[in-house]
Image (cartoon, rainbow, N blue to C red):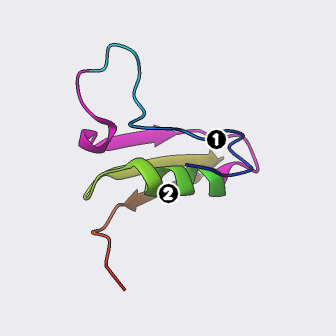
């Protein structure tokens, strides 16, 4: 994913070293981004998450949001 706020491009299938599954098989993501990185986290989730995955985002005091990746529709 290329995004100026992210700072670099991820080539191929991103995963942690030793991770036995592909990133699109992860069902639940939790993020606690720095102020100003919220939009970048949503773009990253949209780019790498598989259908049905859930993102729990803690954006600050009493600001917790849940997102679910829906099936991509072809337009």
The quarter of the displayed image where residue 24 is located = top left
Residue topped by disc 1: 33
Q: Is residue 26 above or below residue 49?
A: above
In the current view of this chain or complex, which residue is farthest to the top? Answer: 18
Counting from the top left corner in percent of width and height, residue 12 is at 42, 38
The residue lying at 63 percent from left, 52 percent from top is 40
Q: Quadrant of the C terminus?
A: bottom left
Residues rendered magenta in the picture:
20-38
Q: Residues within 10 Å of mark 2 (few under 14, many from 20)?
A: few
Q: Earlier in the sequence, mark 1 or mark 2?
A: 1
Counting from the top left corner in percent of width and height, residue 17 is at 39, 15
Which disc number belongs to residue 65? 2
In the current view of this chain or complex, which residue is farthest to the front? Answer: 12
The residue lying at 29 percent from left, 52 percent from top is 50
Would you say 21 lies left or right of 33 here? left
Q: Mark 1 and 2 residues: CB-CB less than 8 Å, in contact? A: no
Q: CA distance from mark 1 to mark 2?
A: 12 Å
Secondary structure under the numbered disc 2 in the rendered image: strand
The residue lying at 73 percent from left, 48 percent from top is 5
**49 or 57, which is in the foreground?**
49
**21 or 67, which is in the foreground?**
21
Membership of 26 in magenta stretch: yes
Would you say 33 lies left or right of 54 here? right
Q: Is residue 29 above or below residue 64?
A: above
Counting from the top left corner in percent of width and height, residue 57 is at 51, 48
Counting from the top left corner in percent of width and height, residue 23 is at 33, 37
Membership of 33 in magenta stretch: yes
């Amino acid at each position: 994913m290329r995004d100026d706020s992210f700072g670099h491009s991820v080539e191929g299938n991103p995963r942690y070293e030793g991770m036995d599954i592909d990133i699109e098989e992860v069902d639940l993501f939790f993020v606690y981004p720095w102020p100003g990185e919220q939009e970048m986290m949503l773009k990253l989730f949209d780019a790498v998450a598989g259908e049905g995955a859930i993102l729990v985002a803690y954006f600050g005091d009493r600001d917790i949001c849940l997102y679910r990746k829906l099936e991509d529709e072809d337009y």
